[in-house]
Amino acid sequence: MHEADLLRSFGIDPAVLDPAPPWTPCGSAAIERLRGRFPCLGCDAPSTVADTVTAAGLGRRWVDLCMPCLIAATPRSGAQAPLEDTLGVLRDAAREVGVALTVVTDGA
Ligand SMILES: [Zn+2]
């Protein structure tokens, strides 16, 4: 996810984020950050991810998130297979394991 999109998805002004140090090998600064038990920017739960963004004019800033908020903010894009291809995979899998499969669609 583009950093600006990440911040926008949480409605966060990068100016309010804590300054982060320069990149460190093996993420040692991030590990240390996690020990601080900072609240998730999305929901205030204890963060489990210490990421950074580089904000124009502000430099690197910490982005503390919990895993559910990180997953919620992660775009699920990419090439999608046509529905018939997906259904074909499901039918093949059901046939292979001997399970009856009925696909119900809304006609859309
Ligand atoms: Zn959260």
Image (cartoon, rainbow, N blue to C red):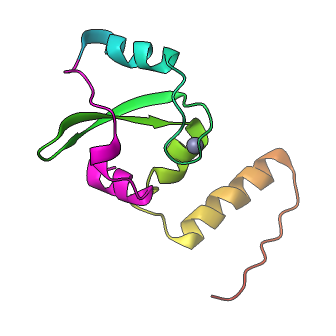
Q: Position of residue 73 (x, y in %)?
A: 47, 52
Using residue 79 as the reference point, say whether residue 96 is left or right of it.
right
At 33% from the left and 15% from the top, the residue drawn is 29
Q: Which residues are magenta?
A: 1-23
Q: Give the side of residue 57 with respect to residue 34, left or right.
A: left
Q: Is residue 45 magenta?
A: no
The answer to which of 90 and 107 lies nearer the viewer is: 107
Residue 77 shows in the view: no
Residue 21 drawn in magenta: yes
Question: Front-most of 21 and 107?
Answer: 21
> Looking at the picture, does residue 105 appear above or below residue 32?
below
Q: Position of residue 83 (x, y in %)?
A: 57, 71
Q: Quadrant of ligand 1?
A: top right
Residue 8 vertical placement versus 45 (above, below): below
At a point 27% along the width and 54% down the height, the residue shown is 4
| On-image quarter of the C terminus | bottom right
Q: Is residue 16 visible?
A: yes
Q: Residue furthest left?
A: 57
Residue name at image x 37 percent, y 32 percent:
51
Question: In this picture, is 34 found above or below 69?
Answer: above
Say which of 107 and 56 sits in front: 56
Residue 81 image offset from top left, x and y in percent? 48, 64
> Which residue corresponds to the image point at 72% horizontal and 60% vertical from the top-left?
91
Q: Quadrant of residue 9?
A: bottom left
* Most distant residue in the bottom direction: 107
The number of callouts visible is 0
